[in-house]
Image: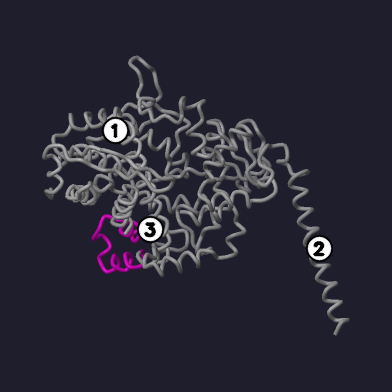
Amino acid sequence: MMAVLTVAFSMANYVILLIASYYITVLSYRLLLHLLKSYPGPLLSNLTDFYGGIYSFQRTLHFKTWKDHKQYGPIVRQGPNKLIFNSVAAVHDIYMSESVSKAQCYQAGNVNPSMTNVFNTIDKHVHRIKRRHVGQLLTDRSVRTFEPKMGEQINVFLREIPLTYQNTPRTPINMSERCKYLGLDITGYLGFGWRLNMYMQFPALRRLRLEILFYALAIIQGKSFLQVLSKMIQSRLAKKTNAEHDLYAFMASAPETPEGDKINIKEIWNEGIFFLPAAGDTTSTALSALLFYLARNKQCRDRLAQEIRSKFSSSSEIKVSRLQGCQYLRACIYEALRMSPPVPGTLWREQMPSSTGKPFIVDGHTIPSGVQVGVNIYTLHRNPEYFPNPFQYDPDRWIPAKGDEIDIRPEDQHSGLKHNPAFMPFSLGGRGCAGKTMAYAEISLAMAKALCAEFKLLDIFTSSHDCPDLTFQPRGDHWKDLLTVHE
């Protein structure tokens, strides 16, 4: 027996020695011989993707990236095979290049590896097909068609505010929570986070299947996203294909799909899993940020209220098409998106295998094959080279002075705002967010209706993760217009 134990103990030591030798060799290579060894970055990030995993778990990776750029410069090695840039040149070279695709890490958060959606598919041909189907729902024309339904949900959102007037002392409203409800309500009609970022930063976590724990907790709490989505899809399937102006109506009549000749329920499910949180969370974050900064900047708030009230006498007159000419409103939205982008992280890209014959150059640096590169949106939006006084909420930075010759984006022709190539809250290029038109429409409509009803923000309470909490005060009888249902 002792002989057996001795042999087993010796074999265990041998295995441990082999494993230790392997990791020492790998870590030594990454630190001393790797092609990216000359790029600065934290020691832990040079050795393992665990660095990104730690801070993404804490939900502070965007802020840590900003601090790393301040410490190490415009290029930071944030993983053994990852480089983050902080320049407009890098934005162009990475996100506007035809030879670049989304990085393999996007598939780490895919629940079903055999099915992809418009967000996590890497194949450009597959993405173009999916984008064409989903994109039809998010065009300017589609937004105008959907506007009445959007307006109904915004009115419901605003009608909740007068209920707090009856409380003494007046109860602050958690606008972050309310905005999230609004975003999910709207995208729920139209379309029928956190775990993903951890998997993208540290793909090894994917093997632990942590989503099972998250889903189990959600079910226990009675708030399972997948259960809600399932009920929504089943309810929609009970209606005719063209009964609603929504995602199902467009996808069910699609002539071709990447996975087959006909759209099936699994594909609609897969797109819905992405569509609801992507559209709902991003717009709710942007609207919450806008309310937060306006509550802290009375001069901006008063100026915006004056613009809205001088153009509309009641909330029933407010239409998305007429809001496009509200220059200061759009500038306030841009500035909120700059300071608090809905997706503050790094959108990873890498050169496609078919393009390895040509050098991949980012901001003058030749990138080896297999290296993931990206620009951190939160950090770029706080780069003083592109945005002077970056921590100051200043909508005027978007408004040209008289006589200025400026470059204006096509989408800003009506409002005439300045174009800043470092502004990318919805990403850029072929993989840029298809829903930004819908997002701008929803945020503009909600903010304009709130101000037209003459709500006054009285005070604000902030915390690190759940704000703003706002108290509203009615001025005059304009708020009663929200209680009237307009056809």
**x, y (%) of residue 87?**
55, 31
Determine the secondary structure under disc 2.
helix
- Residue under the point 39% across and 59% down: 272
Amino acid identity at mark 3: Pro
Q: Check if residue 233 falls in the magenta segment.
A: yes
**x, y (%) of residue 344?**
48, 43
- Residue under the point 58% across and 33% down: 70
Q: Which mark is residue 447?
A: none
Determine the secondary structure under disc 3.
loop
Query: Which residue is under mark 1?
Result: 329
Marks 1/3: CA–CA distance: 40 Å
- Residue under the point 55% across and 30% down: 89
Q: Is residue 21 above or below residue 282?
A: below
Residue 168 appears in the rendering? yes
Mark 3 or 2, which is nearer the eye?
A: 2
Residue 487 appears in the rendering? no
Which comes sooner in the sequence, label 1 or label 2? 2
Mark 1 or 3, which is nearer the eye?
A: 1
Give the residue furthest to the right: 3
Amino acid identity at mark 1: Leu
**x, y (%) of residue 312?**
16, 34
Determine the secondary structure under disc 1.
helix
Marks 3/2: CA–CA distance: 55 Å
Amino acid identity at mark 2: Leu
- Residue under the point 31% across and 64% down: 232
Query: Which residue is under mark 3?
Result: 255
Q: Is residue 302 above or below residue 281?
A: above
Give the residue furthest to the bottom: 1
Which comes sooner in the sequence, label 3 or label 2? 2
313 to the left or right of 229: left
Query: Which residue is under mark 2?
Result: 18
